Amino acid sequence: MSRIEYQVVHETVYTYAWQVTNGQHYARLTPRHTAVQEVLWSALEFLPSPAEISKHRDYYGNHCHIVLIQTPHETLHVTATALVRVEPLVLGEAHCLQAWECALPPSLYTPEPLEVADMRLATAMTPNLNEGLQMARRFFTPQRPWFDAMLDLTRHINTEFAYDPEATQIDTPLSEVFATKRGVCQDFAHLMLSCLRSLELPARYVSGYILNEPPPGEEKLVGGDASHAWVEAWLPEAGWIGFDPTNGKLANAEFITIGWGRDYNDIAPLRGIVLGGGEHDLEVRVTVTRIG
Amino acid sequence: MHSNQQQTQGMQLQTQGMQMQTQGSADAPAPQPLLADYELPPDRYDEMFSAADTPRPHFQPVYAALQQTSAGEMAQRIQSAERQIRDSGITYNVYTDPNGVDRQWELDVLPLAVSASEWRELELGIMQRARLLNAVLADLYGPQKLLQDGLLPTQLVLAHSGFLRNAYGMKVPGNHYLHLYAADLTRSPDGKWWVIADRTQAPSGAGYALENRLIVSRVFPDLFRNMNVRHLAQFFSTLRDSLTFHAPKGDGSPLAVVWTPGPWNETYFEHALLARYLGFPLVEGGDLTVLNNKVWLKTIAGPRRVHAIIRRQDDTFCDPLELRADSSLGCAGLMECVRRGTVLMANAPGAGVLEGGALLGYLPRLCEHLLGESLLLPSIATWWCGEPAAMADALEHAESLAFKPADHASGIEPVFGNDLNPEQLAALKANIELHPERYLAQELVQLSQSPILNSRQHHSLTPRAIGLRVHASMSSNGDYCVMPGGLTRVSSAADARIVAMQRGGSSKDTWVLPDGPEDTQFTLLRSTLTAADLVSSNPMLTSRGAENKYWFGRACERCEDIARMLRVALNAILQESEDGLNSPVFALAANFVLSDDERPLDRRLLDACTLESESLGLAANLRRLSHLAFQLRNRLSLDHWRSITQLLRNPALNKEVTLSEGLAWLDAVLITTTTLSGYALDSMTRTTGFRFLSIGRRLERLGFLTRAMLIACDKGRDSGLTWLLELCDSVITYRSRYMAQPEWLPVMDLVIRDESNPRSLLFQALGVRDYLRKLEADHGDCGAELLEPHIELVRKLDLDSEFHPDSPRLQQVLQDFSDATLAINARLSNQFFSHPRARVQNDRSVT
């Protein structure tokens, strides 16, 4: 696999039951640079046009936009566009053979990078659960290579859990996902994080996109892609390596990263506070096109 | 107790029987029933006594005053203090109190005196601690050197729910993260003070201390003056000046506000008091809005830039856009203003990370490192179990330690090791080993004790364990200023191990004695704290405040109108009214409150009285009234608030009542609503807020009267009119004027056109118009002109030709007034009250 260039168009449309007079939105839709990803160009458009836009980087360095819309509207369009170049992952053989214990926390006062220490900790959405600990221990047996154990856990979630968009909501607790064995990418990412963090292994939640190549001979469906979520785990010296429990594989150059955090809450793509509006319909269209 | 005294454990002080003491006299020391029940255990420090009946020198004047005051006089003083507490509505809401959210504030009138030398030490210690904690915050939300260099375990900070990542890198005006700080102190048997907890998020208690001072200084006015007790006023003016000084500038004169989560909060009373005392508006999240990355207050005169916020709101509730999405208490966009430094937050969001106690054990080292000084005021020994060595040690000595959550948000309840049976202890140890970072172990301290006056009848003292909360504020010179006083918290038992208001218990005023003559001179320069100090006008009326008052006025009047109407209707059923069963009041009731079904009329009327399920009925309206009254609680005395809550506890409520029960219930309702009206007229200052309340009342009554009169017209000349007079509370006026059966012309004249009758249509209309005109002086057109033509028309109606039920002009005028009330309501809503509640939306479309 060599480097790939993509165009990503991510459209979100809210249709409200009645007029929204004022809307504030917190968007994390702009991809960031990473060790393997270069953002060549990006744009974020709101319709109706915002009265104000302010930008900042959050605690983890992700791009955030805070947008104020004061034009009364019944439909809100948000379009994020980006051109991104992704390098394939190169893993040395030495890395692949390291025992997983090397990623365990050092002693209390041996400083390690804070971004790593932060990702060892359970959060409200990725609590330490007995089910998670048991599942993690099945794969992380003493002295097993880190890479093998990670990949097995990733595949295990993919085989044992069913993809079912109807099964969960944003606030479905993880214990329920463990019990029903159904959910979507967010749930599976949280589940894997919960397993890893119960062993105090550092891992983070990644928000982004995945390229879905059409079956041979068929044309690619415009808007048929979706935003995606997976996990990156930290291996000393090698750094952060992506695993996608939803698809049961290593996250490589077909994955485009927007940003990361401890869980969904840290990197939710779009969150808003509106006045008025009543019930709303939400439509999201994502098109990831390989351009080079 | 000091070891050199020859006392046996738990010895009783002199017992002199329980006889009442009469007027004390200087030359013949009175006997001491005061100390009949007072014990001085040897393993406890007593604040007042160094030995049996030997007060400590700085407590001597207090003790002498106690001896010289008769039991009767003391009882009077205590009663007067209790009356003040009730009248000013001081409350402390206790979440766990099944009897409702309000508990009257408990105050013991005997102050805790602290000597000048002792205070000086405490003061220096508190100032240093505030500086230290501020420096720790500046590091955690900035360079994070303490974590990188291993001076603080990363987990202690990163796993704490108070570590607010959204606040990282924020620009803090003047680098003052901590503007308000409080330390909870306790005194060990050897007389040393120790810090048991640091309060950095939104420390409460300064306002209660102020209120206690106000009351206690009146209970002992001479003693207070003679002892030259240091005043509290300067602390609050320091805080006020400091916020103004450090706040960012621009967009008009500096405006600071006190941000409360609302009346449900346990310390809401204090928020209201602080706001009033500092002269800052009291606001809720819905009063604030963010525009142009700045915070604005929605007032009836348009948005005003907010430069500083005293935050009594927990930080995770501050901004629903970025933080807790389920919070309706916040202000969306606030965090971005905080990061950009366009608003001063006292305290900075994220300051709560220092609370919980895990930090206590690290403070000596941090103090050396950050300030280059040794820590002056020690914390009680505390070990964070996240450190393996500390955990092992703590588990070994579990019986002699208290175990507490390192983070209040964890839901872990504090326990005392020696309370646990072997199984419980094993379970605790297992939990700690599973999540050591969530626990801390703390040495048990024997709290000091201080006497309280134990009851009205017996003029005697009882020992109680106490703790002291001391407050510090940033000042405009860039260093901290400590309030010379504080909130002394009193436990409900002498041997209590925890003193917390939330667990019940009482409080005391804290008297810090002056440092010598200079200090006396200083206090002469300062104004003493009097009631007049508390009167500070509040010119900034928030949109929400105006709306609450308006709807409170309307709801009060609506309850009264409905109750009166139902009483007239029930009396008609009983055939006690001259109109009998043909009374048009039934048509009015049907129009207003009755549900339309097959049940007999009397049942429907009675259900409208007492069942909340009748959504238009009286009971449902009373419930609405109580919600609105709750919003205005900082303006209502406890007695008024209670009169409403008592109605809602009346056994008739939500019961299917009989006619006589129904009438008794209506009488009870009318007494309450009339009291509330009287309160509004007698007790409220004539501010803009009062105008909104009055407009609400009068508009409601105007609407009610016009509907009643339209019904009267509709029912025609043949139906009786007594009901209308009763409804308008004008029977007596009518009888005294006409001594005859009600007739159309005089009745209509009295209830429509008589400008001297406060229940007449014209009286109400003129009232609404005049109040609107007063508003218009400041705020432009508010709709007074909507009433003007109709007022003129009523005045011009020809008595002989138009004052009969068939007159189309009369009916038209009534209809016009009715329409005008709706139009004015809409005008006021658009102009002043527009602050709809926002909702949070998320997207979720994923693979």
Image: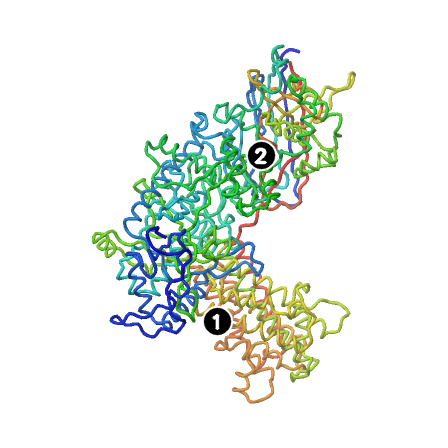
Residue sticking out furthest to the bottom: B739
Left or right of B384 on screen, residue A288 = right
- Are discs 2 and 1 both within one chain? yes
Nearest the eye: A139 or A59: A139
Earlier sequence position, callout 2 versus callout 1: 2
Residue B829, compared with residue B242, is above or below; it is below
Q: How is the image coloured?
A: rainbow
Look at the image and tell me in which quarter the C terminus of chain B lies: top right
Q: Nearer the viewer, mark 2 or mark 1?
A: 2
Quadrant of the image occupied by residue B250: top left
Residue B232 visible in the picture: no
A234 vs B259: above or below: above
Quick one: SS at disc 1?
Answer: helix
Return the residue nearer the eye: A262 or B109: B109
Residue A256 location, x and y as percent? 62, 21
Residue indicated by mark 2: B433
Residue A91: x percent and y percent?
62, 12
Q: Position of residue B447 (x, y in %)?
A: 42, 50
**CB atoms of marks 2 and 1 within 8 Å:** no
Residue carrying label 1:
B678
Q: Dot 2: few (<14), some (14–19), or many (≥20) neighbours within 10 Å?
A: some
Report if residue B410 is visible in the image. Answer: yes
- Foreground residue among B598 and B235: B235
Mark 2: secondary structure? helix
Q: Position of residue B148 (x, y in %)?
A: 45, 25
Picture residue at 60% right of the left edge, 19% below the top: A84
* Chain designation of label 2: B
* Residue type indicated by callout 2: Glu
Tag 1: amino acid: Gly
Residue at left 31%, top 70%? B30
Q: Is residue B805 left or right of residue B493?
A: right
